[in-house]
């Protein structure tokens, strides 16, 4: 079968068995170096994607994507109902609900803890957050209006020493004013549910949920609310949608989105991932430099062959392509080996780390430091494609100088001492 000359000779040089084993070893080490660089880069970026995904789900599952309020945090019933109706015209908004937000102190058995009190509509909250999915005791729907039930985080419940059916005293920042004095306002609530989000952002230790009607009564808000919370189809479209809402409402209301609270955190993760990509890319660059060295030695080893080919009338451009083909084969096989091994390792790194922790009785991943207690991994095709393309480009670039050197070889000089 006909094959181009440069491809045939380049492939032959790659697999030829010569007495000079050092040259073959250098070519093999170049291939392995590229494979290791690609494997490590895919694995590390997959782990970072896993952390990003887990943290984003935990934060965004609980955080309000878009909120609408006014500057005193008090929307009257006609106003918020009118705004809520206007929000139906936005196709990217899939759910909305009123909420009450205030601060207070929870006390039980002599223990006092500060909390952020959120009054919610339980059926609507199921559409807006993952709270109902994170209940480990009781149900979110048990927050019935007028029963004065409360849902606490697992850590907060443990600190107060309470469980389902126990009473807690909620002291508010809204005082009761009498002709003689100002008294703190408090109310006993029954624990009807406990949720667990996980460590890292203190949701379990700082949040307490009430039925929004009970919250209105507790904070003496009448029929008013603190604001409206909205959920969008795409989390990352929330800032642009918030801007459109603000424009539609003529900037008379305070419209905020999740990036104002958590945007800096995710920007830091994104920047860290980019820097990690660039730094680990240097591993592949080192392997590519090793490829340059190995091809230079191959050119020196094949000077006689090059001279003979030139005397037979082979053009310098063909000589150039012969060594480009040889380097490209090393780069392609090294990259493919790295991609396969990287995908395999990234797919099993979670189980591998769990096995190491179990066998050696060590805790490598602590949830109070890394927000999760295991090593997550999430392979993204865009990362794999970028790594593969970068590796192939650097491998091909590494062949240019040795191939150019080979093409410039003069037959007379190369055969002088043969």
Image (spheres, rainbow, N blue to C red):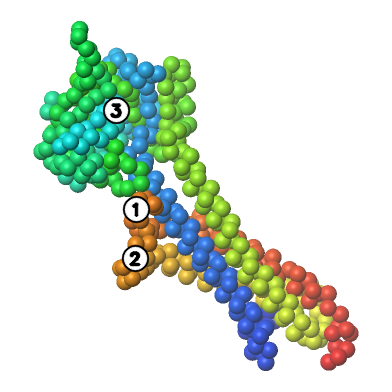
- Quadrant for the C terminus in the image: bottom right
- The earlier-in-sequence mark between 1 and 2 is 2
Of badges 1 and 2, the one in the foreground is 2
The one nearer the camera, 402 or 227, is 227
Is any part of residue 223 visible from this angle? no
Residue at horizontal 50 percent and vertical 47 percent from the top: 270
Image x and y of residue 194, in percent: 20, 42
Q: Secondary structure at mark 3?
A: strand
Label annotation for residue 103: 3
Label 2 to label 3: alpha-carbon separation: 40 Å
- The earlier-in-sequence mark between 1 and 3 is 3
Label 1 to label 3: alpha-carbon separation: 27 Å
How many labels, in total? Answer: 3
Residue at horizontal 20 percent and vertical 21 percent from the top: 185
Q: Is there CB contact under 8 Å for labels 1 and 2?
A: no
Q: Which residue is mark 2?
A: 362
Image x and y of residue 329, in percent: 62, 74
Q: Which residue is mark 1?
A: 367
Give the quarter of the image for residue 236.
top left
Label 1 to label 2: alpha-carbon separation: 14 Å
Left or right: 407, with 412 as reference point: left
């Amino acid at each position: 079968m006909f094959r181009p000359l440069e491809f045939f000779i380049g492939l032959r040089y790659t697999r030829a068995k010569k007495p000079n084993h050092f040259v073959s070893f250098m070519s093999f080490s170049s291939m392995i170096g590229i494979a290791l660089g690609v494997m490590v880069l895919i694995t590390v970026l997959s782990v970072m994607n896993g952390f990003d995904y887990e943290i984003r789900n935990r934060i965004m599952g609980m955080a309000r994507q878009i909120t609408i309020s006014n500057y005193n945090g008090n929307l009257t019933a006609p106003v918020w109902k009118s705004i809520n109706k206007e929000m139906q015209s936005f196709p990217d908004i899939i759910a909305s609900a009123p909420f009450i937000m205030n601060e207070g102190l929870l006390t039980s058995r002599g223990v006092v803890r500060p909390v952020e009190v959120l009054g919610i509509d339980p059926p609507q909250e199921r559409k807006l957050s993952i709270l109902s999915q994170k209940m480990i005791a009781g149900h979110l729907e048990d927050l019935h209006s007028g029963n004065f039930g409360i849902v606490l985080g697992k850590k907060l419940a443990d600190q107060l020493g309470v469980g389902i059916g126990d009473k807690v005293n909620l002291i508010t920042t809204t005082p009761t004013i009498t002709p003689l004095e100002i008294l703190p306002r408090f109310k006993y609530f029954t624990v009807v549910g406990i949720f667990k989000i996980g460590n890292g952002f203190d949701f379990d230790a700082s949040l307490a949920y009430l039925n929004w009607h009970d919250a209105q009564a507790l904070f003496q808000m009448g029929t008013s609310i603190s604001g409206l919370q909205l959920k969008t189809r795409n989390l990352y479209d929330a800032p642009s949608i918030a801007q459109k809402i603000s424009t539609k409402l003529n900037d008379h209301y305070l419209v905020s989105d999740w990036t104002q609270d958590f945007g800096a955190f995710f920007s830091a993760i994104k920047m860290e991932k980019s820097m990690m990509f660039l730094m680990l890319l240097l591993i592949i660059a080192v392997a590519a430099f090793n490829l340059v060295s190995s091809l230079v030695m191959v050119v020196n080893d094949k000077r006689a062959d090059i001279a003979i080919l030139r005397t037979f009338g082979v053009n310098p451009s063909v000589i150039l392509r012969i060594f480009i083909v040889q380097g490209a084969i090393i780069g392609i096989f090294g990259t493919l080996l790295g991609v396969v091994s990287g995908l395999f390792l990234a797919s099993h790194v979670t189980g591998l780390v769990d096995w190491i922790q179990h066998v050696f009785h060590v805790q490598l991943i602590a949830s109070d430091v890394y927000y999760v207690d295991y090593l997550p991994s999430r392979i993204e095709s865009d990362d794999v494609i970028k790594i593969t393309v970068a590796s192939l480009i650097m491998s091909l670039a590494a062949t240019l100088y040795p191939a150019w050197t080979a093409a410039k070889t003069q037959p007379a000089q190369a055969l002088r001492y043969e």
